[in-house]
Structure formats: structure tokens, C-alpha cells
């Protein structure tokens, strides 16, 4: 399975993260398969990070 994502296509969200807003095209990137929650498992915050942003 490939998870292909589009980022920084919402100017306000990019600004609140202090990221540059692309002027020509949004950023296209891939996420690892492990980024997907499967089998109706609940969302959790991993112990190794306190900087979590959800994506839908």
C-alpha cells in the first residue's frame, strides 16, 4: 500500500506551523504504511513525541 499525501495546500495551516507557503504547487510526499491506524484501533500519542498533528 502507498500513502501519498499533499501538504501545505492550506495557507493558514502552513502559517501556524511557521512553514513557507508554496507559491507554485503544494508539497507531495509519502507516508509509511505504519502511519495508518488499522482495525478500528484508537488513536494514541506515542511516548517519543509531544508534537502530533492529525491528518484526514
Image (tube, rainbow, N blue to C red):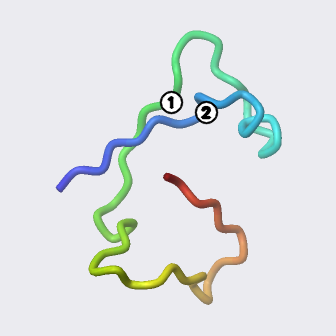
Indicate whether 29 appears above or below 11.
below
Mark 1 to mark 2: distance in Å? 6 Å
Locate residue 19: give its quadrant: top right
Tell me which residue sits at (46%, 84%) in the image. 42
Farthest front residue in view:
40
Which numbered dot is residue 27?
A: 1
Which numbered disc flags the more N-terminal residue, 1 or 2?
2
Q: Residue at x 80, y 35 (%)?
A: 15
Picture coordinates of residue 12 (x, y %)?
77, 33
Q: Residue at x 61, y 89 (%)?
A: 47
Label pair 1/2, CB-CB below 8 angstroms? yes
Provide residue 17's location: percent of width, then percent of height: 77, 45
Q: Which quadrant holds the N terminus?
A: bottom left
Looking at the image, which residue sits at the far left? 1
x and y percent of residue 31 in the render? Answer: 38, 54
Q: Is residue 52 left or right of residue 42?
A: right
Residue 22 pos. (x, y %): 64, 20
Look at mark 2 in the image and give the residue it sits on: 8
Amino acid at each position: 500500500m502507498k500513502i501519498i499525501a499533499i501538504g501545505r495546500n492550506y495557507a493558514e495551516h502552513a502559517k501556524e506551523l511557521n512553514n513557507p507557503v508554496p507559491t507554485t504547487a503544494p508539497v507531495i510526499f509519502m507516508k509509511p504504511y505504519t502511519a495508518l491506524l488499522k482495525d478500528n484501533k484508537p488513536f494514541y500519542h506515542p511516548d517519543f513525541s509531544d508534537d502530533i498533528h492529525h491528518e484526514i
